[in-house]
Image: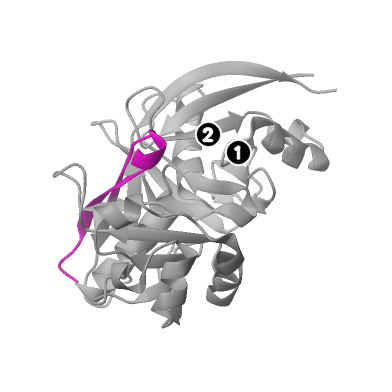
Amino acid sequence: METPFYQVDVFSDKLFGGNPLAVFMKGENFKEEQLQQVAREMNLSETTFISPPSNPNASFDVRIFTPTKEIPFAGHPTLGTAFVIKYSGLIPSTKNHLILNFKSGLIAVHFQDNGLILMKTPTGKILQTISNTKEVAASLGLKEIDIEPTLPIQTVTTGFPALLVPIKTLDAIKDILLDLSLLGPLLKQGKAEMIYPFTRQTLDQNNSIHARGFAPFIGIPEDPGTGSVASALGYYLYEKRPKEKNIIIEQGYEMKRPSNIFVEIDSAQGKDTEIRVGGRVRLVFKASLYLE
């Protein structure tokens, strides 16, 4: 059986930038064990499978797999899958929004005229605060003095929990070398899948934050662009400095796959904080998988 799929680069408008994603059509035709096998074969940070909606309020169901496991939600798979749905004609070219159903629930996605694709993420939550800065620094191959003391080290989630680590300088971010023997127990303690060090020093003066994302225990040694964690970082920064409502995060530069991730926060008295994350998506290729 021939099954079409697309590969796209998310958080970039340039070829071979951003975070690559494989998107498979006709997900309902795959046997359950084949989903993980295909994701392992693609060997990208995530692979998605589109199926008809099981929820009456959704446009499509989407499942997300890393090379080693299924995950309930992630940002760049959401945006890249939405792009493919529109590009491939599964929705009319004039339609500027859709709702995708993930294991974590429904996510609304909007297409803007300027080429940005934005998704509304779940409400942010602070899950854990880690006080042992020396241990956290050592897990990154850094010194305790490299940790920014004015911000806490916290696990934050908007659907995908990550341990956010404020770093003083861009030079320190570049010098990160993971110590997996320390990082494994630390992530377990923090109830996080990813460690996400960030600094306010940037390579591009138009950007707000420089970040790196590491999730080696779920098959992602380093991630070029992490939308769900970008939204968590936006929530984290807004909670501490409410005037910080719009940021641009640069990520993936050390991997030579630069990503620019846009985060917008809306809040009004008496209403939940709304977080939107997005970027641009570039088509790389279309191909076919031959299933037995």
Q: Position of residue 241 (x, y in %)?
A: 19, 72
Residue positioned 56% across, 41% down in the render: 45
The amino acid pointed to by label 1 is Thr
Left or right, 260 with reference to 6: left
Q: Secondary structure at mark 2?
A: strand
Q: Secondary structure at mark 1?
A: strand
Q: Nearer the viewer, residue 73 or 87?
A: 73
Quadrant (top left/top right/bottom left/bottom right) for the C terminus: top right
- The chosen color scheme is one colour
- Give the residue number, with chain letter if any, for mark 2: 21
* The residue stretch that appears in magenta: 242-262
Left or right, 52 with reference to 267: right
- Give the residue number, with chain letter if any, for mark 1: 48
The answer to whether 202 is drawn above or below residue 10 in the figure is: below
The answer to whether 120 is drawn above or below residue 191 in the figure is: above
Q: Nearer the viewer, residue 87 or 150?
A: 150
Q: Is residue 102 visible?
A: yes
Quadrant (top left/top right/bottom left/bottom right) for the N terminus: top right
Check whether the beta carbons of the residues at disc 1 and disc 2 lie within 8 A of each other.
yes
Residue positioned 24% across, 59% down in the render: 169
Left or right, 75 with reference to 144: right
Q: Residues within 10 Å of mark 1 (few under 14, many from 20)?
A: many
Residue positioned 66% across, 48% down in the render: 54
Q: Nearer the viewer, residue 91 or 112?
A: 112
Spatial distance from mark 1 to mark 2, Cα to Cα?
Answer: 8 Å
Q: Position of residue 28 (x, y in %)?
A: 73, 35
Q: Inspect the magenta stretch and tell me whether residue 260 lies in it.
A: yes
